[in-house]
Amino acid sequence: MERRKRRSQVRREAVGLYLDALREQQELEAVGLVTEEGILVAGSGEGDLSGLADAAVASRYRSVRWGEGVLHVQRFEAVGLSLCLASAGKSVKGHAPMHRIARILGA
């Protein structure tokens, strides 16, 4: 049985679709995948996603005040890149999302 409802052969778009699903499943306000240089690879949610990217890269901590809420930052390596998975409101649960993103980027 096919689990995914939407898919794309374009990696950046595929990551975006995955982040849409992740945001919905984990009830996140916003979520973004950011390079260590501050480039927003893909994001999902309302609000200033480029600001989310900037705050994630600047943060040395796993959680930081961002606007009126909290930004959670999880750093990981994939396909030779240092990346941040940043989420607003709640922290992304588990390590599976980072593994799935790495798999999408490496496809």
Image (cartoon, rainbow, N blue to C red):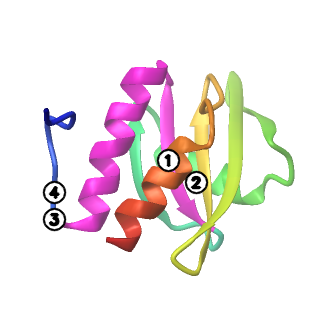
Mark 3 touches mark 4? (CB < 8 Å)? yes
Query: Pointer 3: what residue?
Result: 9
Q: Amino acid at mark 4?
A: Ser
Q: Secondary structure at mark 2?
A: helix
Q: Residue at x 31, y 63 (%)?
A: 12
Which range is magenta? 10-35
Q: Is residue 93 magenta?
A: no
- Image spot of residue 56 (x, y percent): 68, 51
Q: Which residue is mark 2?
A: 53
- Res 8 label: 4
Q: Specify few, some or many for label 2: CA neighbours under 10 Å numbering under 14, 14-19, or 20 or more.
A: many
Asked if the residues shown at circle 2 and circle 1 are in contact, with their CB atoms under 8 angstroms apart, the answer is yes
| Label 1 environment density (alpha carbons within 10 Å; few <14, some 14–19, many ≥20) | many
Disc 3 packing (10 Å; few <14; some 14–19; many ≥20) = few
Amino acid under disc 3: Gln
What amino acid does circle 2 point to? Ala
Please give the label number shown on residue 32: 1
**Dot 4 or dot 1, earlier in sequence:** 4
- Label 2 vs label 1, nearer the camera: 1
x, y percent for residue 18: 33, 44
